Amino acid sequence: ISLSPLVGPGTDIVLDVVELSKTSFRLDSAGVYDVEVGATVSYGADQAAGTYVGSYSVTYEYDGTGNAQTFVGTVELEVSASATPLVVGESISLNFGTLSLGTTASSVQIDTTDTVTVLSGTVTPSGTPSSAVFDVVGEASSNVYVTLSASVNLTNGVHTIVLDNLVKDSGNSSPVVLSNKGEGSFAVGGDLTLPTNLSSGTYTGTYSVTVNY
């Protein structure tokens, strides 16, 4: 087997491996046999987009005759331009406002419209709560999928509370659709579990937000 590189608008691409479905075979009664050919190529993320063309040759020898025949095949590869890298940033932080605890363990929820709801217990919400808002920039008119932390601990340095059930405004399984300018945003809410005998103070923590095409 002889290989030639694929030539196109950028750096030549090397054919790493060419594989044949059969390296020895018997021709049928019509003197024909089909051989499948596969190939492996490698190129970097900065490879210029465009069409690359190369070739390979395979030489077969007729058994016992010493006669050989060389077949030449063409390899064509289309390299697409890489998608615009995604950039995500938080423009509004998740904030439950002020929570005044009663005498029992409680849980509260903030939805993606900034509304705090008491799910259980005797906690009283007040202040200026806000759901988190994230801005995304990427490939125009593309779908972007968001993955949020399952849960995270918030602490005031003495006690810990749990933030979980993080959810974005259109649902965690639905994509954020970027505009024709490649811009989009989404809001995030979640639930807080509040045990009894918590000390007062500001509870903080971090959670992860991952975006992918």
Image (tube, rainbow, N blue to C red):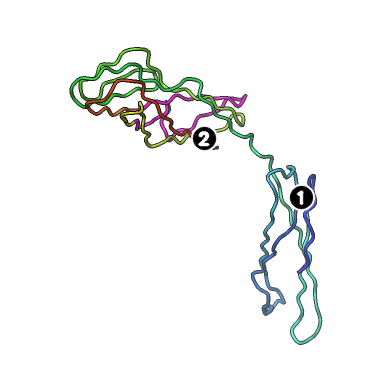
- The numbered disc on residue 25 is none
Residue 161, percent from left and from top? 31, 30
Give the amino acid type for the residue marked by disc 1 in the picture.
Tyr
Mark 2 neighbour density, 10 Å: few (under 14) some (14–19) many (20 or more): some
Q: Residue at x 61, y 31 (%)?
A: 139
Along the viewing direction, whichever of 79 and 65 lies nearer the viewer: 79
Pointer 2 or 1: first along the chain: 1
177 in the magenta segment = yes
The residue that disc 2 covers is: 211
Q: Which residues are magenta?
A: 163-190
The residue that disc 1 covers is: 52
Which residue of the protein is positioned furthest toward the top in this rendering? 127
Which residue of the protein is positioned furthest toward the left in this rendering? 103
Q: Is residue 203 above or below residue 74?
A: above
Residue 130, image quadrant: top left
Give the amino acid type for the residue marked by disc 2 in the picture.
Val
Pair 2/1: label in front: 2
Task: Check disc 2 and report its element: helix, strand or loop.
Answer: strand
Residue 74, percent from left and from top? 76, 59
In space, the residues marked 2 and 1 are separated at their CA atoms by 32 Å
Which residue of the protein is positioned furthest toward the front in this rendering? 158
* In the displayed structure image, the side of residue 202 where residue 19 appears, left or right: right
62 in the magenta segment = no
Q: Residue at x 66, y 39 (%)?
A: 82
Along the viewing direction, whichever of 119 and 65 lies nearer the viewer: 119
